[in-house]
Image (spheres, helix red, strand yellow):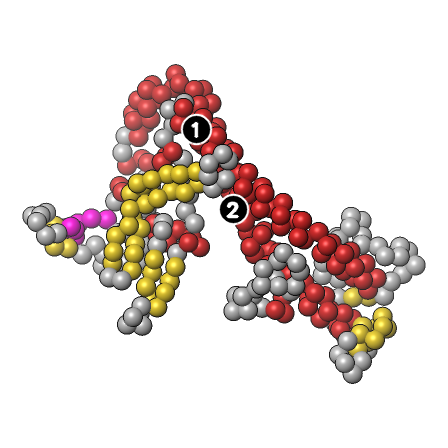
Amino acid sequence: MPSFSKMGTFPVGYFRATTAWLLRERRDVATRLATLQAEMTRIGFVTMRYRKVKEGDSTKATEQRIGFSVTEGSTLARLVQAYIATGGNPFNISGFLHPESTLVEEGETGEAVVLQKYPGGGAPGAKSTEYNDPLPESAKEGSDQPEMTGYEGYRGGMIESHRYTPGRLGSRMDRGTWDSETVLRSMHGIRGWANKEIKTRLQDKEWRIVKLSDCWEQLRMERDFTLLDAFGGQLIGVPERDDNAIDSRRLCQQLIADLYTLMFDVGESGLPTGFRPNPGLGLLYFAFPDEPEDSAGSMG
């Protein structure tokens, strides 16, 4: 069987072999971190800037896009340059939202102060409303038109984003309730002759930009979470972990030590005295003795 193929139940020899291999792999973690950082620098980072408004002591980001920048000299920078050269608008590619950028601080009065960089805190969600929504709302100062008349559609569950079409239409309408076929035929007549150009000059580049941005995010997650969760503060090059965010009992070495104490006999120090089976192992039903057919040190 392939290496590392057993997860829930396994021979004791398999566990010893796999954990020994994994612990030896720790020597490459520092190099792996350097490679991740170099690859992230090569890919680059896209920043979308949004107009912000004050709400009390908090700062809320609106959906109005006012700026766009990319890491100079990066792969994404060259892709965006090519995209703009063929008529693309970088504001159309994606929102490039990052939820972890939102900060929550304690204000002077003890209330939470939210500082947003991206709309919806980087993760726009569904609206929560009263059961009798919509209710009439008076006009803004300087206007004689009410904000809401009370005849609008129910807004509960609508995504708080101007890109969510049902929210702007006022309801999740069935396509059969309006003459969509006529509109579709007209739009096809307008753009059908240029479908290949739309794909090759704009859409293909947009997809590549989004995929590279997603790749950057995956590398960041591996650098800042996966490796930190496994080895935070334990290896050279791996930052100290935040004990409030990462349980030290979830570190790789600690998990291995815990399972060793379950599977093998332990002394007064609480550490395994050898590879004799723990007397209670037979009651756990996840490990079993090796057979001669199991090759020594097998990870399969």
Residue 39 picture location, percent across and down: 58, 41
The numbered mark at residue 50 is none
CA gap between label 1 and label 2 equals 21 Å
Instruction: Check residue 148 for magenta coloring.
Output: yes
In the foreground, 252 or 177: 252
Q: Residues within 10 Å of mark 1 (few under 14, many from 20)?
A: few
Q: Is residue 209 visible?
A: no
Q: Is residue 21 left or right of residue 194?
A: right
Residue 24 x/y as whole percent: 76, 56
Dot 1 corresponds to which residue? 81
The magenta segment is 147-153
What amino acid type is highlighted by mark number 1?
Gln
Q: Amino acid at mark 2?
A: Glu
Looking at the image, is mark 1 or mark 2 nearer the viewer?
Answer: 1
Residue drawn at x 37%, y 38% as measured from the top left: 68
Point 75% across, 73% down: residue: 262
Which structural element holds mark 2? helix
The one nearer the camera, 102 or 2, is: 102
